[in-house]
Image (cartoon, helix red, strand yellow):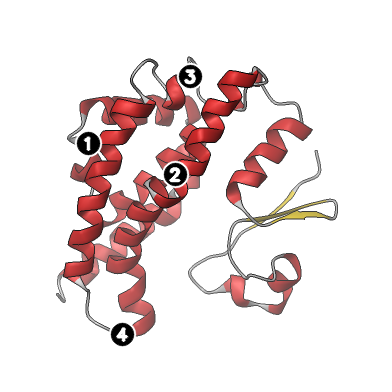
Amino acid sequence: MCVNLVSCKFAGEHFTEEFAKVNRFQKVPAIDDNGFVLRESVAILKYLTVKYKLADHWYPSDFERQIRVDEYLHWQHFNTRLNAAMIFRSIVLDPQTTGKPINWKRIEYFKGELSKTVEHLEKAFLQEGPYLCNQPEISICDILGACELMQLNAVHGEQLYESNEAVRKWLERVKKDLSPHFDEGHKIVYRAREVFDRMKGKL
């Protein structure tokens, strides 16, 4: 499998001319698989699982199970992804890039929305199974859901989801299933937490 995964760091590598050749939107993630370029995480995960015939549980071939996975993949954009990302962005990224003080009113709004999201995860997506979409095994939607919530760990926001026992246990299963790659993939989140800890002393 010859896949060139293009990533960036806090240094702004995604704004370089080289990266723009892969993704004109200058956003991450992006993938260049022997000239076939994709610029969106859901599409990338589907592409990799189908083209390279990965284990069926990642993106089930069974029609109804697959549609259940797709249901979450569409829902998460304006729920898990939006709310977790906006809390992380408002506390960590925006103050560094704009120089403006943290907008705590905005953060409280997204915390409220995230609380609803966590409840939906429990009651709609974890009601009948150990993994999202009530799947018996881990799938690509678990990867996306876990990664979005992990952003909160960078700002000591674990309590925003860990207070929900079903969601906490689900995330523990995902971490275990993806070990040791889970921690490797979240090094930036762990580093961001160190940055936030330093920022707290200046707030």
Circle nearer the N terminus (1, 4): 4
Q: Which amino acid does label 3 sit on?
A: Gln
Circle nearer the N terminus (4, 2): 2
Give residue 191's position: percent from left, percent from top: 37, 58
Q: Which mark is residue 162?
A: 1
Circles 3, 2 touching at the beta carbon (< 8 Å) = no
Circle 2 residue: 76
Q: What residue type is labelled 4?
A: Gly
Q: How many marks?
A: 4
Q: What element carries label 1?
A: helix
Q: Is residue 75 above or below residue 112?
A: above
Q: What element carries label 2?
A: helix
- Per the model, the C-alpha gap separating discs 3 and 4 is 44 Å
Circle 4 residue: 99
In screen coordinates, is 12 left or right of 91?
Answer: right
Q: Which mark is residue 135?
A: 3
Circles 1, 3 touching at the beta carbon (< 8 Å) = no
Q: Which amino acid does label 1 sit on?
A: Glu
Give residue 162's position: percent from left, percent from top: 22, 36
- Choose between 46 and 159: the one closer to the eye: 46
Circle nearer the N terminus (3, 4): 4
